[in-house]
Amino acid sequence: MSETKITRKDALLYGGAAAGGLVVGGAAVAGVAVAVEGAKQAPAVEGEPIVARYVDGELPVTDPDAGAWSDAQRVLVPLVAQQIAQPYLDKAGVGELYARALHNGAEVALLLEWDDDSVDDLDGIRRYHDAVAVQLPTRSGSTPPALTMGSPGTPVHILQWRATWQRDIDSEGRTGVDQIYPAVVHDVMPDDVLPPETANLYWVGREAGNPLSQIKRSTPVEEVVAEGFGSATHLPNQTARGAGVNEDGRWRVIVAVPSERAGVGEALAPGTSWPVAFAVWLGSRENRGGRKHIANWQTLVIGAQR
Amino acid sequence: MAKVRNWQLGRDMEYPYAAARPKRQFTMIMDTNKCIACQSCTIACKSTWTWGKGQEFMLWNNIETKPFGFYPTGWDVNILELLGEQEWDGDVYAGQTVFEAAPEGERVLGWAPAEEDWSHPNIGEDEPTGNAEETTYVPETPHSMMWMYYLQRICNHCTYPACVAACPREAIYKRPEDGIVLVDQTRCRGYQECLTACPYKKTMFNLETRVSEKCIACYPKIEQGLQTQCTTSCIGRLRLTNFLSAPDKADPRKPADFLVHVRKIALPIYPQLGLEPNVYYIPPVHVPTKYLTQMFGPGVDEAIAMYRNAKDDPELLGLLMLFGSTERIMDTWDVRDGVARAYDEDGAEIVAVPLREPTFVRPFEFATEVAGEPVTGYRHNT
């Protein structure tokens, strides 16, 4: 894993723009093919658009090994430690993300891969999760929004996958105290002695309607809109889906969203081109919130529909 | 960073947000001398607010033995060590606060307790500072070498909270009506930045709802004019829930203003950290003042002298005796004819407490009648 650390704010904010001509700090890169270990890994290119190939029929949203993915071009996306807004990530733990994309006219899916030999899929005390996020503008235009999760008046649409939510779904139930501390012993809990409407008050976040606290989860991907750091707002209508798996020290995560983007922004229509940015969190390195790895804007091309 | 006035430091300081003092400020006064660490307050709090699944380790209120007790482990010594040695210049703090000493990329100088740090809430209980021989056989300095005391801890509902400063989502706020600091349960996304930033370590992460929680100062009770659960359950009657004014607006008729600003008998905890905490402690009279000055700032010797003099200070004595005498929040009090009385905001009397309880002495030997027969005996107290 290489480490790239960029602190120059303007390079991150404005360098590269939407065209994928990425020059950040000393890590100047051009379209160089990079061979990656492992049989499943196709060669990757860097500095080129991520082209979402058209697929006829259902997208392989839960299967990173599906054949359709191997036909999609892998693009290497450099990651740096977030050091624009406090709190900073003081040191990068992963230097690159690999992205590829597919679409079927109704849905756009991205397969994202990065090295992480520690699976962190429980939220506990000083215990944080692995995650990845995809950031898209809500509106088309020649200038991408601020990389810093948009800015007031120029929102971004973010799709975040968390390992914790994946575990919630994979274990067919919400994970919590019983999974963090398998030997835990309880005597009397509120729901043993109180009617549910009263007992539930002891899960205040859940009762208050915080989407992070909900016991039932149908997707490991959350859709939010934001107008700057700290402003992520859960969308009332959650349409994104996906799946993630960690094998051989590498996360492979699929994030998919309906092309329509109803109520969020302009459709990701065939033949259009979009700025796209990414963020990666390593739970084992206490990444959370703004303590994350970020990528500069790349270009996502929605391929023509055959 | 904004410049704000921190009266506990006697100077202005840097803080990420502009000063916005609440209409009135929730405060609690603790008389450390009366505590026996029975943990009635802890249980009252736990059984009211934090007995849900996901809150197993949470004690919004705890009592710890000082100097070797901590919850979480090492909370105060760790931040003191991080901050390094700092100086007071008389009543003016000449050192750096946790905001001023924040490293690059951080808003607050802090550290994150590990999960095991929350696992020993009663570590160090009753451990004194020395060996028994050192005290027992040195009669001329009976308390100089061995001491310990109990520290009562809730959230300090600080004027300049570090949790508020550190939250990247502005999910923690200070209520303008009473200064109570709360985590917005709909807005928190569980980053735990507040756990790292709060030097008192009084925000906690709920393992089931995956968001942070903290002492809410029993605000549903405060809104009804009632003192908190930890206050009203205290069998030592050492706590007072009240409201505190800034020094320039201090009203000597108000209990907390009188104790903090007039008699200066109650002192803030680790004021040098810069948060202007709003829980105040009457320091223990038997502990070396060097240690107490580190914990409570300047004014420890004067506070102890004031406390020792309380028997000759009816106004102060009366107020101390009103601690734990009513569930309701006192607005004012007075002492007349050997009786201390507390009043509500309308001036109506809430409770009256005599400064001295009447005493009756029974003779050692007595003679009386039982069923018409004369009986003599003597009193035997067992």
Image: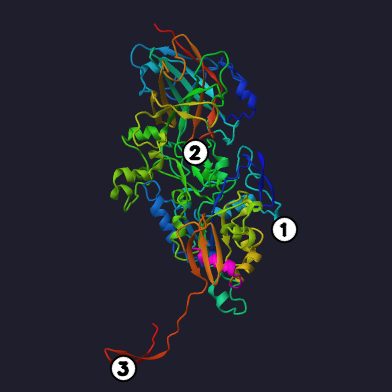
Magenta stretch holds residue A241: no
Q: Chain of mark 3?
A: B
> Which residue sits at x=49%, y=32%?
A281
Give the amino acid type for the residue marked by disc 3 in the picture: Pro
- Find the residue positioned furthest to the top: A306
**Image location (x, y in percent) of residue B55:** 40, 48
Q: Chain of mark 2?
A: B
Which residue has dot 1 on it?
A: B90
> Are dots 1 and 3 on a single chain?
yes
What is the quadrant of the N terminus of chain B in the image? top right
- Decide: few, some or many residues near mark 1? Use Cα within 10 Å; few <14, some 14-19, many ≥20: few
Q: Nearer the viewer, residue B200 or B249?
A: B249
Q: Nearer the viewer, residue B171 or B338?
A: B338
Give the amino acid type for the residue marked by disc 2 in the picture: Tyr
Nearer to us of marks 1 and 3 is 3
Which residue has dot 3 on it?
A: B374
**Image location (x, y in percent) of residue A207:** 38, 39
Q: Going from the N terminus, do you reach mark 2 or mark 1 first?
A: 1
- Decide: few, some or many residues near mark 2? Use Cα within 10 Å; few <14, some 14-19, many ≥20: many
Q: Going from the N terminus, do you reach mark 1 or mark 3 first?
A: 1
Q: Chain of mark 1?
A: B
Q: Of helix, strand and loop, which one carries label 1?
A: loop
**Image location (x, y in percent) of residue B365:** 40, 91
Q: Of helix, strand and loop, which one carries label 2?
A: loop
> Which residue sits at x=62%, y=71%?
B309
Q: Nearer the viewer, residue A77 or B30?
A: B30
Q: Nearer the viewer, residue A156 or A275?
A: A156
Nearer to us of marks 3 and 2 is 3
Range of magenta residues: B311-324
Which residue has dot 2 on it?
A: B191
**Image location (x, y in percent) of residue B338:** 54, 72
What is the quadrant of the C terminus of chain B in the image? bottom left
